[in-house]
């Protein structure tokens, strides 16, 4: 790497810092609210640092996000629902994605298009039918029911992404295994799956986010506080009208932490997954 | 190649491959044109009889009356003295004068301000005569367009906006014909034949004398002409420049002369009267009547996809409406039209750009670009309907020798597909089918019990077998029982969804363009040799993707809140963006760009690594500037690699929901914008609407639009298969 002249380096860093500012300002805006103990309602004048720095709002939401529900309880629900939807999507979709990536069968093109259509349905399109289906199964207000709903949102797109993950595995490896007498299932389980694992992780993460961030549909199903997810709890802060801005901001930041942590851990894989995805046609 | 000696003789028009028509084909074509013209005439006369009286009709009828009175008295000076509503040139009004001159005089229509409501009644048969005169000119326009392309003529003949505004006493009839003739004569001249060029100039003059902005067709012609004859290989100099500009200048001068001749009101005092007439419009665009209409910048797009059935009191004036279909074909036809008839596309683009910028946005302005629009739609129809059908037919005639479906492969794949298929069938396919059923009924939160116990299928079954009469669906008519509503609801949503659809188009374009620009720029910046802290910056920039969309929306909502937002507190004043659709678009699009741009940065970064460095070395030897390197190398090589990510970003932007939900709440429902997905949700939610059937119809519209988008994008880039992570 050759050294840049200092002034050029400065200009580049300045440009990057501007972009960094664009990225950070909204988040800092939330943070200044989340750590301000003085706020009752919305802020009334301009300041950069919290007026009264305190962990009080964070503690408040930690103890109670909605009537009779603590943050940890809500996080648990979120993880069950979003994680379950993710697991269902990957487990049930992986073999289908593999078939689309590797095999030739009648209706393949139409099927691909149908998958994409499924991926672009707005969530509300699935509401009434799922409502009826889950009521009939007596699952409507349970976490399991919500898990099914979020699976319906996440699965088509997840299959689409999984297909890309499998396509990125060099077919020569599978051919070699087949020559050695491995059955298609063995090849899939022992060769393709392990190689594709990082990319599958990315597909799973995207599926997880779909359920983790959803609240509008959730409120049409769940009616008990014990089953409320974090996203649903935060949305109820807004829709109640009397917004306690600092607690809402604290909750929003708190609920982002697990995902941001996951992203940082998976960053390398994520970049690789995108690299593969971007080059493969 | 351009001939430097006589640019005037250079061929400028790319024509369709000339083929000699056989006698049979010629007859067929003539019959098609004849049918189209008769249809156009019939539809317009029907509308002229039945359309209720609209705004401004009394004004122009009064103008016609003044001329007719003068004509009947043999007083030709009336053309020099009178031009009622001086802001518009008089040619159309003179036409009305001649149309009324043969009729017995009626009491003079009173002078009312332009903003007055439509007149209660106007004298007959005078009204019909004037309407028919206007319609006649538009029928001639249909004839002219059909001669170029019969299908385009058909589209122009049946377009309800075209019918409505040319079958009323408005100013549109005459200039729809003359503006089309500017272009058609120019095409016929191929830039060489002086007679046709002179005719084109004359048509330009007449157009300007009928209604100024229709002259944009001539601007397109001028631009195309200058571009084609630009002296690229000659020695640059004053003489070459003069030779280049002279023919176009002569053409424009001739047009000016014709304009002056056709506008007798200018003769006594040209400068003052012309200035008054022109300056009126700048003032009018700021006037209260225009402001009160409150149309957003992109409203013309909505007019383009709407049907006249959806606004105003149309009465039983129209027989059928396929306007949204025409708009659809136009999307698919743009590329082919650009290859075959660039002038027409130029005309269309220039006019659309003007309408988007100009702040007065009445629906009749759309007629300025109706002719090229219909031609583009005709090409689209050929490309996506006619040719695939013809190919299919030819394939069938050849016998089924094509590829046989691979059933054995299907059998092998079946066990792999089965688990996913079963689940998808239950949780997405069944809901989708159910949605179609719901959209055919009046299912609402009141009839939930009935709908949950099979009411939807009962009603659909009865409706399809003709045992139930369709009801009209509305928010005030909710019952405990479901009813069959027929396809009317779906059609209603299709037709009236165009305002939101127009916003969606602008929205998606703005968001994806913003994300791409920022993402590619930062990716390039990070790739510069020697930049420090690259990894840190990248980790920071990925942050918005890791943050749940809801939290991002909340952060931006707290930042931009009109009263309590960080920005408004810093500025120390209330922000007014919720009052203006354009500013609201800017605020929301910034937030949406923030949420998605890092993914494009990653995709662009991955793509940039694939461009070999040698290409740049070669360009550096050739002395390319940094901008040229980007324009000519980086961007063209990067675009195909970005295409998959672009598709996904476009779809996600189109379906953006949480952002609008959160902003809607934070601003107490004051934001003037909504996407179809958000609209569908609010209509669905029992607290707001509880109209499940309307929501279902909107969802079906969304699916239709996005499927078409993907098909279109696939034709365009063949990248659909490569769509991967997002």
Image (spheres, rainbow, N blue to C red):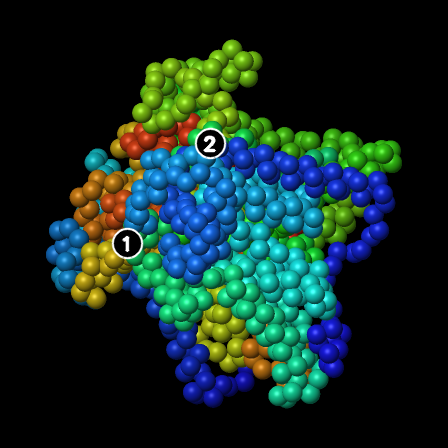
Disc 1, SS: helix
Q: Which of the 4 image quarters holds residue B110? A: top left
What percent of the width, then of the height, locates residue B493? 45, 34
Tell me if residue A145 comes above or below residue A50 in the rendering.
above
Tell me if residue B225 comes above or below residue A229 in the rendering.
below
Q: Which residue is mark 2?
A: B50
Q: In this orientation, which residue lies closer to the viewer: A174 or B718? A: B718
What percent of the width, then of the height, locates residue B178? 57, 55
Q: In this orientation, which residue lies closer to the viewer: B441 or B53? A: B53
* Residue located at (47% from left, 69% from top): B522
Q: Is residue B443 left or right of residue B702?
A: left
Q: Which residue is mark 1?
A: B288
Chain letter for the residue marked with disc 2 in the picture: B
Q: How many marks?
A: 2
Q: Are marks 1 and 2 in contact (CB under 8 Å)?
A: no
The N terminus of chain B: image quadrant: bottom right
* Residue located at (65% from left, 49% from top): B144
Chain letter for the residue marked with disc 1 in the picture: B
Mark 2: give few (<14), some (14-19) or many (20+) Cα within 10 Å.
Answer: some
What percent of the width, then of the height, locates residue B384? 67, 44
Would residue B679 be visible to someone looking at this image?
A: no
What percent of the width, then of the height, locates residue B108? 35, 43
Tell me if residue B317 comes above or below residue B296 in the rendering.
above
Nearest to N terminus: mark 1 or mark 2: 2
* Residue located at (54% from left, 37% from top): B44
Q: Are marks 1 and 2 on the same chain?
A: yes
Q: In this orientation, which residue lies closer to the viewer: B543 or B704? A: B704
Would residue B413 be visible to someone looking at this image?
A: yes
| Residue at the outermost front position | B74
Q: Is residue B586 left or right of residue B38?
A: left
């Amino acid at each position: 790497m050759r050294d840049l002249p200092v002034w050029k380096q400065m200009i580049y860093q300045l440009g990057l810092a501007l972009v960094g500012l664009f990225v950070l300002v909204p988040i800092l805006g939330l943070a200044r609210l989340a750590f301000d103990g003085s706020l009752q309602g919305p802020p009334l004048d301009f300041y950069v640092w919290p007026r009264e720095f305190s962990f009080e709002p964070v503690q408040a939401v930690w103890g109670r996000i909605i009537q009779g529900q603590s943050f940890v309880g809500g996080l648990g629900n979120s993880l069950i629902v979003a994680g379950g939807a993710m697991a269902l999507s990957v487990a049930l979709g992986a073999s289908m994605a593999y078939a689309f990536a590797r095999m030739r069968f009648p209706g393949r093109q139409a099927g691909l298009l149908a998958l994409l259509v499924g991926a672009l349905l707005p969530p509300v399109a699935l509401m009434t039918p799922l409502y009826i289906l889950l009521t009939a199964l007596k699952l409507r207000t349970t976490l399991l029911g919500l898990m099914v709903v979020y699976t319906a949102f996440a699965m088509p797109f997840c299959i689409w992404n999984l297909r890309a993950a499998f396509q990125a595995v060099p077919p020569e490896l599978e051919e070699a295994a087949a020559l050695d007498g491995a059955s298609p299932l063995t090849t899939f389980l022992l060769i393709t799956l392990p190689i594709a694992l990082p990319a599958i992780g990315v597909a799973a993460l995207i599926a997880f986010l779909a359920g983790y961030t959803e609240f509008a549909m959730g409120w049409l199903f769940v009616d008990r506080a014990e089953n409320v997810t974090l996203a649903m709890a935060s949305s109820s802060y807004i829709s109640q009208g009397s917004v306690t801005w600092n607690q809402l901001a604290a909750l929003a930041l708190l609920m982002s932490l697990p995902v941001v942590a996951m992203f940082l851990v998976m960053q390398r894989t994520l970049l690789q997954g995108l690299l593969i995805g971007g080059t493969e046609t | 190649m351009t001939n430097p000696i006589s640019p005037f003789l250079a061929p400028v028009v790319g024509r369709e491959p000339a083929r000699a028509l056989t006698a049979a084909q010629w007859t067929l074509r003539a019959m098609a044109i004849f049918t189209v013209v008769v249809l156009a005439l019939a539809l317009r006369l029907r509308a002229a009889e039945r359309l209720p009286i609209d705004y401004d009709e009394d004004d122009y009828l009064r103008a016609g009356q003044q001329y007719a009175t003068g004509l009947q008295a043999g007083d030709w000076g009336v053309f020099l003295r009178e031009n009622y509503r001086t802001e518009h040139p008089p040619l159309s009004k003179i036409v009305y004068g001649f149309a009324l001159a043969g009729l017995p005089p009626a009491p003079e229509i009173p002078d009312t301000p332009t903003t007055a409501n439509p007149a209660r009644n106007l004298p007959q048969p005078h009204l019909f005569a004037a309407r028919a005169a206007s319609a006649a000119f538009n029928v001639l326009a249909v004839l002219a367009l059909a001669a170029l392309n019969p299908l385009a003529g058909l589209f122009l003949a049946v377009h309800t906006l075209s019918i409505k505004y040319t079958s009323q006493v408005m100013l549109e009839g005459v200039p729809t014909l003359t503006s089309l003739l500017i272009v058609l004569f120019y095409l016929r001249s191929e830039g060489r034949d002086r007679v046709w060029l002179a005719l084109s100039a004359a048509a330009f003059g007449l157009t300007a004398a009928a209604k100024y902005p229709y002259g944009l067709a001539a601007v397109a012609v001028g631009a195309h002409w200058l571009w084609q004859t630009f002296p690229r290989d000659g020695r640059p100099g004053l003489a070459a420049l003069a030779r280049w500009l002279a023919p176009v200048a002569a053409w424009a001068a001739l047009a000016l002369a014709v304009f002056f001749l056709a506008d007798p009101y200018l003769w006594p005092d040209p400068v003052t009267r012309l200035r008054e007439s022109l300056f009126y419009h700048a003032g009018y665009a700021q006037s209260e009547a225009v402001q009160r209409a409150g149309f957003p910048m992109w409203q013309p797009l909505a007019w383009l996809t709407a049907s006249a059935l959806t606004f105003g009191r149309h009465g039983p004036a129209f027989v059928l409406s396929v306007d949204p279909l025409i708009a659809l074909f136009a999307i698919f036809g743009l590329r082919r039209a650009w290859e075959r008839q660039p002038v027409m596309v130029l005309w269309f683009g220039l006019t659309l750009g003007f309408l988007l910028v100009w702040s007065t946005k009445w629906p009749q302005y759309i007629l300025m670009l109706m002719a090229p629009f219909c031609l583009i739609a005709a090409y689209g129809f050929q490309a996506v309907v006619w040719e695939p059908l013809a190919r299919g037919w030819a394939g069938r005639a050849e016998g089924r020798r094509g590829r046989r479906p691979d059933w054995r492969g299907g059998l092998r794949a079946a066990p792999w597909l089965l688990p996913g298929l079963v689940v998808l069938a239950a949780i997405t396919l069944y809901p989708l089918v159910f949605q179609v059923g719901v959209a055919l009924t009046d299912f609402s939160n009141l009839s939930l019990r009935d709908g949950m116990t099979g009411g939807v299928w009962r009603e659909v079954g009865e409706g399809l077998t003709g045992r139930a009469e369709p009801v009209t669906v509305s928010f005030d008519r909710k019952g405990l029982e479901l009813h069959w509503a027929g396809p009317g609801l779906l059609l209603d949503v299709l037709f009236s969804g165009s305002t939101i659809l127009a916003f969606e188009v602008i929205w998606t374009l703005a968001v994806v363009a913003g994300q791409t620009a920022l993402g590619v720029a930062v990716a390039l910046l990070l790739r510069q040799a020697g930049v420090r802290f690259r990894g840190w910056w990248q980790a920071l920039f990925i942050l918005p993707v890791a943050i749940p969309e809801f939290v991002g929306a909340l952060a931006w909502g707290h930042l931009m809140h009109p009263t309590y937002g960080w920005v408004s507190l810093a500025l120390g004043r209330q922000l007014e963006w919720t009052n203006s659709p354009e500013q609201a678009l800017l605020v929301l699009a910034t937030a949406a760009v923030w949420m998605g741009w890092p993914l494009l940065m990653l995709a662009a970064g991955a793509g940039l690594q694939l461009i070999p460095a040698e290409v740049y070395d070669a360009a550096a030897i050739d002395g390319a500037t940094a901008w040229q390197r980007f324009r000519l190398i980086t961007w063209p090589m990067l675009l195909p690699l970005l295409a998959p990510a672009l598709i996904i970003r476009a779809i996600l932007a189109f379906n953006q929901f949480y952002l609008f939900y959160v902003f809607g709440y934070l601003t107490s429902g004051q934001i003037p914008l909504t996407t179809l997905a958000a609209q569908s949700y609010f209509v669905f939610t029992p607290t707001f609407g509880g109209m499940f059937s309307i929501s279902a119809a909107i969802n079906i519209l969304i699916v239709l639009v996005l499927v078409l988008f993907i098909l279109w994008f696939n034709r365009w880039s063949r990248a659909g298969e490569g769509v991967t992570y997002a």
